[in-house]
Amino acid sequence: MVVSVVSIVLYSVLLIDISTNVSKSLIYQSKQSLDINVSTLPINDTSKSSIVLDLYNNNILYENNPHQKMLPASLTKMLTAYVAVKYYDLDDYVVINYDMINVEGSRIYLEVDDIISVRDLIYGLLLCSGNDAALALAYKYSGKLEDFIYLMNKEKEELGMKNSYFENPHGLDGKTNNYTTAYDLAILYSACFKVDFLKEVFQTKIYKTTIYSEKILTFRNKHRLVHNLDNCLGGKTGYTKKAGRTLITGFEDKFNQIVVVSLDAYNDWNLHKRLSEYGFNQIKRRDIR
């Protein structure tokens, strides 16, 4: 009888110890889970896909469906500009023909027989989102649109944009469509930011030029945060009915530079400001560790 009582007591103690250890383990796992997921859950992300990337090392500071394939709208034009800078002389010029201006949506209002430099076209492309500027740059390569599209897809592969494919240089969707991801676009911005000329264009508020036909053109940057925030490094805006609002923005503080990308978002200006603050806080937390 004594042996049985002792056995019951020992068995009860063992159960308590096991239960305690299991509870501690669950608490520890829960804390680990929170530590891992906290960077993916800032308050009120109004996009279907977004990312914050550290431009120094391309580390992800925040992500929300960053690899989901989506329509980029005019964010496409960053790749058009990147390819143009790589393959053209900025001081070379383009004679505008009808195929280059036969396009809907945003334009810089080029006319047939205008003569304009590659440099000016890129400013019009990135500041005013000119679809005519995109076509002018594309047709310049060989006179065939598909040859420039081939270069776009070649360059995106070399940049590591593995989940992207492009069918046009402007981002309009309908007859042709471009597909990409927030992550791929962040990688693209990182590459553009290493090109001094593109870095300068992104941050330009207003650009005025007189083209060869003596026409004066003035381009005002459509990116609102360039005009409103001192720490904004510029970027690109986009919109179509199918794609929704798309936006990419670079930010800096004293020591760091980051990029924020959002696809199909509403209230995206405020979202980018919040995510930039969040991203810089993540860098500070990382550095403290």
Image: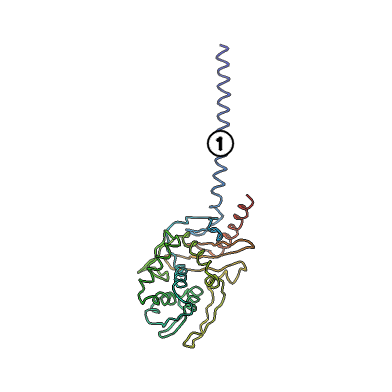
Q: Nearer the viewer, residue 148 or 278?
A: 148
Direction top: furthest residue: 1
Q: Is residue 36 above or below residue 56?
A: above
Q: Quadrant of residue 179?
A: bottom left
Q: Residues within 10 Å of mark 1 (few under 14, many from 20)?
A: few
Disc 1 marks which amino acid? Ser
Residue 223 lies, in percent from the top left, at 54, 70
Residue 267 lies, in percent from the top left, at 53, 64
Check the image and tell me how it is coloured. Answer: rainbow
Is 206 placed left or right of 131 in the picture? right
Give the residue displayed 46% in from the left and 80% down from the top.
Answer: 92
Q: Quadrant of residue 136?
A: bottom left
Give the residue displayed 39% in from the left and 63% down from the top.
Answer: 165
Give the residue displayed 51% in from the left and 55% down from the top.
Answer: 63
Q: Is residue 260 above or below residue 4?
A: below
Q: How many marks?
A: 1
Residue 131 lies, in percent from the top left, at 43, 75
Secondary element under disc 1, as helix, strand or loop, is: helix
Q: Is residue 128 above or below residue 43?
A: below
Residue 160 lies, in percent from the top left, at 45, 60
Q: Nearer the viewer, residue 261 or 255?
A: 255
The N terminus - image quarter = top right
**Residue picked out by circle 1:** 25
Q: Is residue 259 above or below residue 137?
A: above
Q: Quadrant of residue 27?
A: top right
Q: Nearer the viewer, residue 90 or 261?
A: 90
